[in-house]
Amino acid sequence: MKHLTEEELIGYREGETTQREAIAEHLTSCTACRTELERIEAVLSALDHLPVPERGPEYGRAVWQQIAPRLPERAGRGWRTWLEPRRWVAIGAMAAMVVAAFVAGRWTKKPDAGPMAASVAQVRERVLVVAVGDHLGKSEMVLMELANAAPPASGPKQINISAEQQRAEDLLDANRLYRETAEQNGDRALADVLDDLERVLMDVAHSPQEITPAKLESLQKRIEAHGILFKVRVVGKELQEKQNKTNSAPAQTESKARERNKA
Amino acid sequence: MSEFGHPHLTAKPVSCLMIQMSESAGSTQDREALRNAARESDAIAVERTLAGERDAFRVLVERHSQQLFRLAYRMTGNEHDAEEVVQEAFLRAYRNLGQFGSRANFGTWAYRIAANYAIDRMRQKRVEDTRRQTPSSLAEEQEQDPLDLVPDERPTPDRLAGNTELRKKMEEALKELSSSERTAFVMRHWEGCAIEEIAAVLKSTTSAAKNTVFRSVQKLRRALEPYVGARGRLEAKAACAAPEPRGTEL
């Protein structure tokens, strides 16, 4: 009987397509060739156990942080980008925040410079808290809709998520601004949650408009994997509590002022 | 699962990238759907990056970093070099994104860039190492007795990997391969890439790529069989009788 060559055995072990059936047949009847293959297998199995150091789920983000500053600007749509409606949503949100903070600052103006500065800062913080709270609420709605979406029992196989995608895209720009503001304010916890949210929103925004049930499931799994809905809810609740506290604080100061004036 | 229990190796080779992306998916249909979803999402991210949205590239980086690291580590055998390969691969991909055909698969393309850069890096390192290596250190390495590397107890694959000496020997054997051989072995054996993909990275014909895979396995076998081969004999002996004291004929 003609035995198999080492090349044939290695090729067979490494998934070679040609003559597989003939080789397999020979192996069932030839002990010598089978032993030879087992010896090759022993070496390759040992190599299979050579470990690769684990890189956690944050590795992709770390790589991005390393390379992002080194990426050159790409000449894209340029100024046309700023004419897109979704940009105007973000710009509008930011402008509304600035105006609200300015008006609130004027309205709460007091003759005493110290309390006035503190009050303006408080109002600004309150405006930011309200705006971010509102943003998180909207984001939660979009993610909830996607997380609970189910393919139709009958009808077209494709699921249209263009509405959610559009909203995610609109929220993306505002999210970026709030994240940067939170980073500037040193609010690391909020910045981290907004960073996670940004990635999920980006994922949704970059999905095709019409997706298959399997794609929807994969998107839902990605939302679930980030645990973002839970994080958004927790931070949203914290912001709500913060808002309630800051709402009650000025009422106390006003009543104190009235008492002072009476005296 | 293939005939010999290797999950990546089937009679019909498929794209290595596809296997990795769908490892966690259930049915074949699910896997196919996941592959298509990832590909479409990649294509949109590429389009947006080209349109000037730099942040869209982040999606691609976050999605493909892990798998590029695994490839880079297996090719370079070094964490620091592997991380450098991953970063450089993405930087090169970003700079050359204009040349990337929209119909192609971004993952496969980035994979090739990483593999090519890793080859360059390995070649460069090999030259540096040769310059640094002294004749005395070479002699020391050759004096090591293979029997010293055979574990005392009956080894299991896990224990084999845990055996520092054997692990060192395997790493050395991989280092002894030429950069093309190592690339071919990593891509074929660990990453399950099709011969065509390996040929594209090595810039060779498919038959030449096939030969390179064969040569790499043959070299590894020659280098490691004296140590790993003992495992089979040890196990066979242990199954029939009490363990022999160390140093007896196996």
Image (cartoon, rainbow, N blue to C red):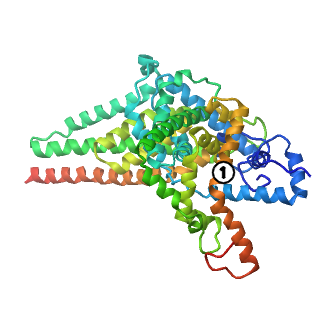
Look at the picture and state if B245 lies above or below A161: below
Question: In this rendering, would B125 be left or right of A10?
Answer: left
Tag 1 residue: B24
Picture quadrant of residue B250: bottom right
The answer to whether residue A136 is visible is no
Q: Disc 1 residue type?
A: Ser
Residue B229 image point, x, y percent: 68, 62
Q: Which of B166 and A262 is in front in this view?
A: B166
Q: In x, y percent, where is residue A3?
A: 86, 51
Q: Where is residue A263 in the image (x, y as percent from the top left)?
A: 7, 54
In the foreground, A32 or B41: A32
Q: Which residue lies furthest to the bottom in this view?
A: B242
- Residue at left 65%, top 37%? B37
Which residue sits at x=73%, y=47%?
A14
Left or right: residue B204 versus residue A92 is right
Residue at mark 1: chain: B
